Amino acid sequence: MQIKLIPLQMHGDERGSLIALEQDKNIPFEIKRVYYLFNTVEGVRRGFHAHKNLSQVVIAVRGSCRFLLDDGKEKINLLLDNPAQGLLIESAIWREMYDFSEDCVLMVLANNFYDENDYIRNYDDFLKTYG
Ligand code: T46
C-alpha cells in the first residue's frame, strides 16, 4: 500500500508559525468540506470504516494520534504528530484512529460533502469488495 504524506510548507518567523492549505496546490483536490476532531476521550478508538469514493487529507494540527490504514491486503500503522504534514487517505482504505493525545486536534479536508451512503462500516463487507 502506498501511503502519501504531504509536506506542508511552514512560514515561520519570530512571531510563530503559519501553514497555508490550498486547493489543487498542496491539497491535491477540490476542498468541499473541512471538519476536525477534538476532545477525544482517552482510550477511544474511532473510524472503523472505509469510503467508497472520497479523498481526504488529515493533519494533526495539535497533539498526536495513531492511524491504522488497511487496503484489504496490507495494514499500516503510523503516528500523526506534525502540523506540517498531511496524510492523504484515498477511497477504499479502512481506517482506525487511536492513541489520541489529550490535546489532539485532527483536521480533515475532504473532496466531497458528508454522505453516510459513502461509508462502508462493516469490515467483512469491506473485505468482500476490496480484499
Ligand atoms: C474519516 C475519519 C478520519 C457529520 O455530520 N458530518 C461530517 O462531515 C462528519 C465527518 C461526521 N458527521 C457526523 C456523523 C456522526 O454522527 O458526526 C458523527 C461522528 O462521525 P464518525 O463516527 O463518522 O466519526 P469518525 O471519527 O469515526 O470518522 C471521521 C469521518 O467520518 C471519516 O470520514 O475518515 O473521521
Image (spheres, grey):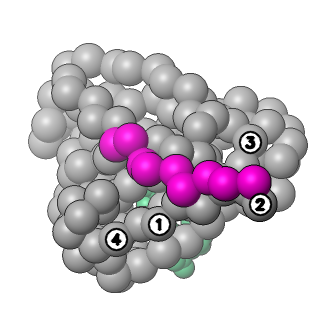
Q: Give the foreground label among 3 and 2.
A: 2
Viewer-side residue, 62 vs 16 = 16
Mark 3 sits on what residue? 63
Mark 1 sits on what residue? 20
Q: Earlier in the sequence, mark 1 or mark 3?
A: 1
Label 2, label 1: how many angstroms apart (C-alpha)? 16 Å
* Label 3, residues with CA under 10 Å away: few <14, some 14-19, many ≥20: some
Examine the rendering and report whether any part of residue 3 can be seen: yes
Check whether the beta carbons of the residues at disc 1 and disc 4 lie within 8 A of each other.
Answer: yes
Residue lying furthest front = 14
Q: Residue 14's spot in the image, x, y percent?
A: 75, 54
Q: Give the foreground label among 1 and 3.
A: 1
Q: Secondary structure at mark 4?
A: loop
Q: Earlier in the sequence, mark 3 or mark 4?
A: 4
* Label 2, residues with CA under 10 Å away: few <14, some 14-19, many ≥20: few
Q: Is residue 109 left or right of residue 129?
A: right
Q: Quadrant of residue 54?
A: bottom left
Quadrant in the picture for the N terminus: top left
| Residue numbers of the magenta segment | 6-14
Q: Earlier in the sequence, mark 4 or mark 2?
A: 2
**Magenta stretch, main secondary structure class:** loop
The amino acid at mark 4 is Glu
The amino acid at mark 2 is Arg
> Is residue 9 covered in magenta?
yes
Mark 2 sits on what residue? 15
Label 1, label 3: how many angstroms apart (C-alpha)? 19 Å
